[in-house]
Image (cartoon, helix red, strand yellow):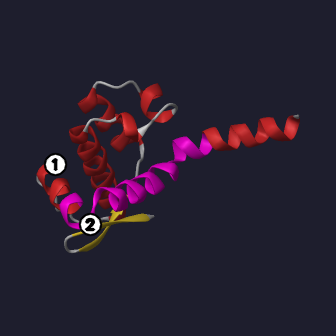
Amino acid sequence: MKQLSTLNGKLPIRYGWGALSDFADSTDKTLDEVMYSFDPSKLKPREFSLFVFYGVKDGCEESNKDFPFESTKDVEKIINKHGLTVIIKEALAAFQESPFIVIEQEEEEDNDKKK
């Protein structure tokens, strides 16, 4: 599982069904928008904070670790400390490992093999 840099070391970050659903509900996005046409450059700053928040929440649940965030304000502190570029890279690496994204990539590979 991917890790996210925080003020107190690394935390697991994962984008399973719960994280994707929570993020979609919180930002009024459809699952198609989140799973197939996701472009982090089009997120508003608060939406990106929510994206990281739900990813860490899902990672902690999957790893049986305590979820240390109370709100997206905790994510803002991490971004201020480590920089936006670092947090974007770590969050996107975790998102790309989502089983929902892997399925799409496998379908593309299968289609390429058939050509």
Vertical order, 1 against 40 (above or below)? below
Residue visible at 59% across and 46% down in the picture: 102
Question: Which residue is at 29% across, 50% downward?
Answer: 52
Query: Is 78 positioned to the left or the right of 109 in the image?
Result: left
Tell me if residue 41 is in the magenta stretch.
no
Residue ranking furthest to the bottom: 9
Which of the 4 image quarters holds residue 113? top right
Query: Is the residue marked by circle 1 packed among few (<14), some (14-19), or many (20+) residues within 10 Å?
Result: some
**Residue flagged by tag 1: what amino acid is it?**
Thr
Q: On the rendered structure, is 25 left or right of 109?
A: left
Q: Say few, some or many: other residues with alpha carbon within 10 Å of mark 2 (under 14 / 14 to 19 / 20 or more).
A: few
Q: Position of residue 112 (x, y in %)?
A: 81, 39
Numbered range of the magenta stretch: 79-103
Q: Is residue 54 visible?
A: yes
Question: Which is closer to the viewer, label 1 or label 2?
Answer: 2
Along the line of sight, the residue nearer the viewer: 23 or 82:
82
Q: Which residue is mark 2?
A: 82
> Which image quadrant is residue 40 in?
top left
What distance separates the C-alpha of mark 1 from that of mark 2?
15 Å
Query: Magenta stretch mostly in which secondary structure?
Result: helix
Residue 54, percent from left and from top: 28, 47
At label 2, which amino acid type do we have? His
Q: Residue at x 47, y 56 (%)?
A: 93
Name the residue tied to disc 1.
Answer: 72
Quadrant of the snapshot with the C terminus:
top right
Left or right: residue 10 versus residue 40 is left
Residue 94 location (% of width, % of height): 44, 55
